[in-house]
Amino acid sequence: MLQKEALEQFIKAALAEDIGSGDHSTLASIPAETTGTARLKIKEDGVLAGMEVAEAIFRLLDDSTRFVPFKKDGETMQAGEVAFEVSARVRTLLSAERLVLNCMQRMSGIATLTRKYTDRLKGYHTRVLDTRKTTPNFRMLEKEAVRIGGGVNHRIGLYDMVMLKDNHIDFSGGITPAVERVVAYLKEKQLDLKIEVEARNIDDVKEILQVGQVHRIMLDNFPPEQIPPALDLIKGQYETEASGGITIENVEAYAKTGVDFVSVGAIIHHAVSLDLSLKAVIHS
């Protein structure tokens, strides 16, 4: 779920970037107290995301905003539908328009692509994870869109989980010293963080099992046929995650192995924004 304080901070920064010294087009053409209504029109089929964000943007600019939702985040949407109607000062509607659309179009694209993956996994144990392959300063909303689309958020950043990947392991001199240093560090700092370790081959899996003290093993760039032998060794002692080269075409093959998670960076960085528009309601 979105954190109110973090969302507000994001909106303020985004509005400052866009408005700068002033929305002069609007300030010059619209009297200050003019009020109006606009509707968010859906122009492309998909999964809707960003309703909570849109309302927060309008309300931050004008706390008297009247926001009427017609659909919910996570619902399928079809071209021609209306997502919401918003009434406020016209200056608010115009100054917020592009930020609302940028957020909702991007988030809806991510939610739509995530849903395609999660639909392929219906009936399987395996769940889809996102990654840190996100847009700087937009990660919170991108990961929220993944959640709306039915995916599972992996760690939010570098601070909320330990993940020992290939470079950590190589710079540390191997899996065993890397894990042992992490365990000692967490104990010293009194940090309660889960530990995940990347395995590049079956021998890495064996070494991780020998050193223990972890929570999840990432099977990196293992083709589907190499996953079951690794799972046979792990025997459910730790969570398992397949990563690398997973696509919409092969995700079901990975799910059939019984691996706990598949991490798919593409659900964020390959997502295409969906077409939405905010249109003024003019009563004749």
Image: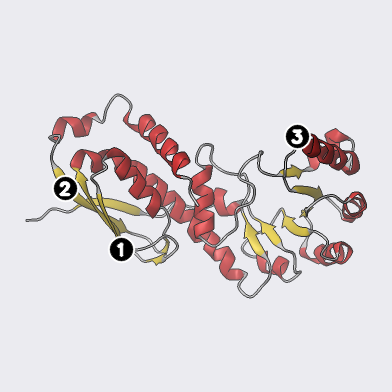
Residue depicted at x 51% and y 48%: 142
Residue annotated with mark 1: 70
- For label 3, the SS is helix
Of the numbered discs 2 and 1, the one sitting upstream in the chain is: 2
Q: Is residue 42 left or right of residue 267?
A: left
The answer to whether 34 is drawn above or below residue 253 in the figure is above
Estimate how packed mark 3 is, as few (under 14), some (14 to 19) or many (20 or more) residues with alpha carbons within 10 Å.
few
- For label 1, the SS is loop
| Residue 74: quadrant of the picture | bottom left
**Position in image of residue 82 (x %, y %):** 29, 61
**Position in image of residue 280 (x %, y %):** 19, 50
Estimate how packed mark 1 is, as few (under 14), some (14 to 19) or many (20 or more) residues with alpha carbons within 10 Å.
few
Residue annotated with mark 2: 36
Residue depicted at x 87% and y 65%: 229
The answer to whether 94 is drawn above or below residue 205 in the figure is above
Q: Is residue 37 left or right of residue 56?
A: left
Q: Residue furthest top?
A: 21
Q: Are marks 3 and 1 in contact (CB under 8 Å)?
A: no
- Work out how far the residue at label 3 is from the one at label 1, CA to CA, in angstroms: 48 Å
Q: Depth check: give the residue in front, 256 or 184.
A: 184
Residue annotated with mark 3: 189
Quadrant where the image shows the C terminus? bottom left
Of the numbered discs 3 and 2, the one sitting upstream in the chain is: 2
Residue depicted at x 72% and y 65%: 254
Q: Are marks 2 and 1 in contact (CB under 8 Å)?
A: no
Of the numbered discs 3 and 1, the one sitting upstream in the chain is: 1
**Position in image of residue 34 (x %, y %):** 13, 40
| Residue 78: quadrant of the picture | bottom left
The residue mark sitting in front, 3 or 2, is 3
Residue type at mark 3 is: Lys
